[in-house]
Amino acid sequence: MATIVDGFEGELKELREVFNSGKTREASWRRSQLQGILSLFKERESDIMEALNQDLGKHNVEAYRDEIGIVIKSANYALGNLKKWMSSKRAKLPLASFPSSAKLVPEPLGVVLIISSWNFPFGLSFEPTIGAIAAGNAVILKPSELAPTCSSVLANTIRDYLDNSAIKVVEGGHHVGEYLLRHKFDKIFFTGGARVGEIVMTAAAKFLTPVTLELGGKCPALVDFISSSWDKKIAIKRIIWGKYGVCGGQACIGIDYILTQKKFAPTLVELLQKYIKKSFGDNPMYSHSMTRIINKKHFTRLKGLLEEPGVKSSIVYGGKSDEENLFIEPTILVDPPLDSSIMTEEIFGPLLPIITVERIEDSVEFIRARPKPLAIYGFTSNEKLQKKMISETSSGSITFNDSIVQYAVDTLPFGGVGGSGFGRYHGKYSFENFSHQKAVMMRGYLIDFGFRYPPWNNKKLQLLKSGLRYDYITLVFVKLGLKGKA
Amino acid sequence: MASDEQQVKNSTATAVFDSDAANSLVKDLRSTFLAGKTKSHEWRLSQLKSLLKMLDENDKQICDALFSDLGKHEMEAYIHEIAMIRNSCKLALKELKDWMKPEKAKTNLGTFPSSAEIVPEPFGVVLVISAWNYPLLLSVDPVIGAIAAGNAVVLKPSELAPAMSSLLAKLLGKYLDNSAIKVVEGAVPETTALLEQKWDKIFYTGNGRVARVVMAAAAKNLTPVVLELGGKSPVLVDSNIDLAVTAKRIVAGKWGCNNGQACVGPDYIITTKQYAPVLIDAFKHNVKKFFGDDPMNSPDISRVGHENHFARLKKMLDDDKISGKIILGGQTDKNNRKIAPTIVLDAPEDSLIMSDEIFGPLLPIVTVEKIEDGIEFIRSRPKPLAAYLFTNNKQLKKNFVNNVSAGGVVINDVTLHLMVDTLPFGGVGESGMGAYHGKFSFDAFSHKKAVLYRGFYGDAPARYPPYTPGKLRLLKAILDGSLFGIIRTLFGFS
């Protein structure tokens, strides 16, 4: 039986009316909501941290570093740039259209639907919401039911701090999601997996609703031979952080697998083991510095990856798991079979395959032969290799000598390509994502080129040809009858 | 190569372009793309130069094809199609180097030290599906963008403009690199076969019904789309205007642009009850001036595109709901597919002519009490591709621009914004998604990849486990972006 969310259609109607009234377009409203988000995160920080700990076992530092701090940064950035983003931009005009002026006027799309994910339930809900609000839209937010405490805290805090007539939260599982998708929105912003992404886009097609799909993929880290011990140390720390330290590997831009030279692999594995111990201690499950697996289903999936033929024997470190606590310890594998699931599906967990190649440049071909990921990482100071990676691979982004931090750079667009999605946001791109840039042209009445109008004749054709070539002297001569042809 | 051409040409004959053929075509183009051929600046320039040559050497054939398909006068062919494509090509040739350059992005304290840039790259193999009303323009303009951005392209021209479709297949085959740019002719079966393949981007120009099919097909491969659709583009006419110029521009914009069959052509007029008679007189005067005493048979007016279309327009004219309301024209000639410039006054809202996009030479005039009511009228309907206003009243202009959502808005003229390549051309809501023209064409077919460079210095230990309260404090300071805060925390204060 199809799910009906009680009262939803009435709520949607209300949102539309509020939007049509112009309320959300006022700069003062947008500011007040962005301020509201800031207050929400500052005053309810402990509730948020507790919810993240409850649903994911996320440590306070992670919670702040990856979600709370980021949202605060983004809301402040939006507040600081709102006036600039909202202003019209002049467009240069060619002489042939003189006298006139043209500009681009940004306007909100209307009522937008934001569907968020469970791994960064606050970050991935609020980051697009900030863009939607800054652009002047009314918002319906559907958080992931897989992080239920977070979903509930989201709904409560948004109700307490934001304008309920224009920003609403609808909680629930995929039946609720499907129900929502049967309605018309002016934009849908989806963060999640490709399978559901396809469902969202197919549903949106019925209404010609534009969508942004922020998906995932297998984000590779190419690790070049590093000679300096200082550099090695930093690189290793950043790799460990990018794999295990951000939501326990359950991040769309987390490092999925590593590519490195056969010769360097043993050193790499040794260093990884050393620093994993340093970061998470001898018993990572009790370090409280690593997020646990979100639920039984994913836990079983990850365990299953390790049990495939050829994969188990490639484990060189870790591999132990605790089903009751949904915990899997940091695990390293070297050269599991390339056709195994761990090497064909997005891992989204703390299992790190290392694939060895003869020459480091071979990694580029390896990456190219596979679907375009959301992020590619290159740990190398070799400029030639960097250039090769940039020009010969395609991904949402490329980051050199670090991982994940590109997420925090407001001036860089964040989004995928190919299998990792389309559309982008962060910073001004969030504003643009939820805006329509309307072209506005203003003409005067003076100076009208007679050759624009029928009836057509050869003379007019000549005039036109000159006009469009901005060749005014000829134009004048032909008009005056002093020249027969342009 | 000859056999490919043969296969493409004979879509209505023995060689059927089915799913396998489409699959094989995409595979070939993908190999070309992956080999890196289309990425070089030289290749893109060479193709654009060839396109320009193609236009210059074949302008007569192009005009002939447009006349054969649509009865389009050479002048219209030149202004609205050939000249625009030439300008597009020339702009791309001139600006391409700049467009291809990475754009620097400033980085902040959070990732210090670092540098960042945004690098444009082609998507890969793209599909362009074009329309019949401006069959040269709507085929080649997006292809210019695709090539400029470094993609391999398949163009599927509209079968409803068969002379142009066949000419495009011939000319593009002759002038451009066939290993990367292909034309597939055909109708629904061929388009379906194409839509079953995995594309890196699909660019569709046409109507909302087919657009839904295109987007649903694209969804299967998570392919991003640009949909350039239509809608009922309204013209709100105030009484405070220069009547002579206004009437000229509207009449030329309606009937001088493919006889109303243009996506941004004026669909209907809104004016005050009081002003309507004055406006109607001016329209009638200009119709006569431009098209003579027998406008339906004027050589300066295009034919109706095709039979189904003619039937649809005839149905609108025969609609009981508008009987007695036709105040100009109304004549039709089925054999020659001609319909006279027609004006209908105060057609009821539920009449056919007021519910669907007309896309033809019928011009309804809706009258309102106050001119501001016109804005409300427009707002209560689906967002059109273009909205027009004629007035000298500053307040009304402001009201219109702020409150009417459309792909584009023009004050005191119609359709002109199409020719301005510094303005993005595209719809919103029912009129479409995405935009192109000028640099926006390049952007439409490019992925802008974010690139962040970091060194191994400047590491913030606070971000790594094991986590401590001290690290939390430091992170707060770093994310706050305040240098002072960071120093304080580092030195143990706070």
Image (cartoon, coloured by chain):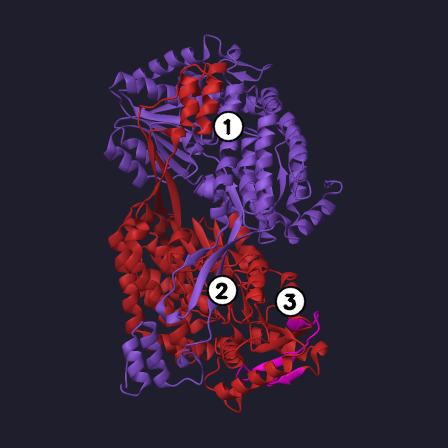
In the rendered view, would you say B69 is above or below B378?
A: below
Please state if B449 lies on the left or on the right of A82 as rendered. Answer: left
Indicate the chain coloured red by its letter. B
Which residue is label 3 attached to? Answer: B372
Q: Which mark is residue B187?
A: 2
Image quarter hosting the N terminus of chain A: top right
Comes first in the chain, label 2 or label 3: 2
Height in image: A404 above or below B269? above
Describe the element under mark 1 as helix, strand or loop: helix
Q: Colour of chain A?
A: purple
Q: How crowded is mark 2: few (under 14 residues within 10 Å), some or many (20 or more)?
A: some
Q: Name the residue under label 1.
A: A69
Q: Quadrant of residue A98?
A: bottom left
Whether labels 1 and 2 belong to a single chain: the reply is: no
Kind of residue indicated by mark 1? Gly
Viewer-side label of 1, 2 = 1
**What element does badge 3 sit on?**
helix
Host chain of mark 2? B
